[in-house]
Amino acid sequence: MSEYLLSNKRRRSPVCPAVALCIVLVSLLLVAACTSAQGPGNLATENQTPVPITTATPESKALYKVTIAQPNDTTHPDYIIMDSDIYNQGEVVEFYVVNKGTDTLTCTNNRASYLIIFQNENGTWEYLPEVGPPMLPKISYLKPGETLPPRRFVTTGWIPGRYRIVFDCGIMREFEIRSVTT
């Protein structure tokens, strides 16, 4: 009978370590998953903010390096940095924003949102809805010294004349589009 018990124990021996090893591995995997650092991809309750889809716009290569007179008001045109204020039709306009003041600017929409308006023949200003990112109703701030990333748009098909880049933070800059004659 003792031989029977010995032979029976030998048959069970290889199975016990294999099962124990599997249990240890599964436990390690569960512990590792529960203790990993929170990141953007492993939170079940994370709120995703939609990112506007933009097409690639080539860099600005303005033919003119000219600054035009800006309106004499408090719209801080010097906060919008451009490589020129005069562009030919079809050129790329590139700009970025720097809060050069000492106060934080409050924007009623997302601070990256801007409008382009143009001056028509009557002297009134009209909005170009197809240019600029969508206005997202979210109060945001631009602290002193803070810079927004560069923005670009192409002026192909635009009517020659005077235009404005307008941010709802109280900053604006004028530029001109000239006709291309061949």
Image (spheres, rainbow, N blue to C red):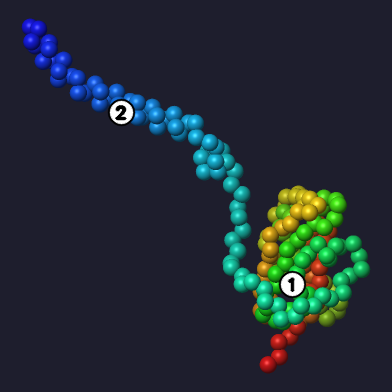
Q: Quadrant of the N terminus?
A: top left
Question: Which label's residue is closer to the chain start, 2 or 1?
Answer: 2
Q: Quadrant of residue 77?
A: bottom right
Give the CA distance from mark 2 to mark 1.
Answer: 65 Å
SS at mark 2? Answer: helix
Amino acid of disc 1: Asp
The reply to whether residue 156 is visible in this rendering is yes
Q: Quick check: 69 above or below 97?
A: below
Report the disc number at residue 62: none
x and y percentages locating residue 70 in the rendered image: 87, 71
Single out the residue that lies furthest toward the top. 1
Q: Is residue 9 left or right of residue 128?
A: left
Residue wearing tag 2: 22
x and y percentages locating residue 57 in the rendered image: 61, 70
Residue wearing tag 1: 83
Q: Quadrant of residue 84?
A: bottom right
Q: Quick check: 112 above or below 90?
A: above
Q: Quick check: 121 above or below 13?
A: below
Q: Quadrant of residue 54?
A: bottom right
Neighbour tally class for label 1: few under 14, some 14-19, many 20 plus, Cα within 10 Å:
some
Q: Quadrant of the C terminus?
A: bottom right
Residue shown at the point (49%, 31%) measured from the top left = 35
Residue shown at the point (61%, 49%) measured from the top left = 49
x and y percentages locating residue 127 in the rendered image: 76, 69
Q: Quick check: 13 above or below 98?
A: above
x and y percentages locating residue 85 in the rendered image: 78, 75
Residue shown at the point (76%, 54%) measured from the top left = 146
Neighbour tally class for label 2: few under 14, some 14-19, many 20 plus, Cα within 10 Å:
few
Amino acid of disc 2: Cys
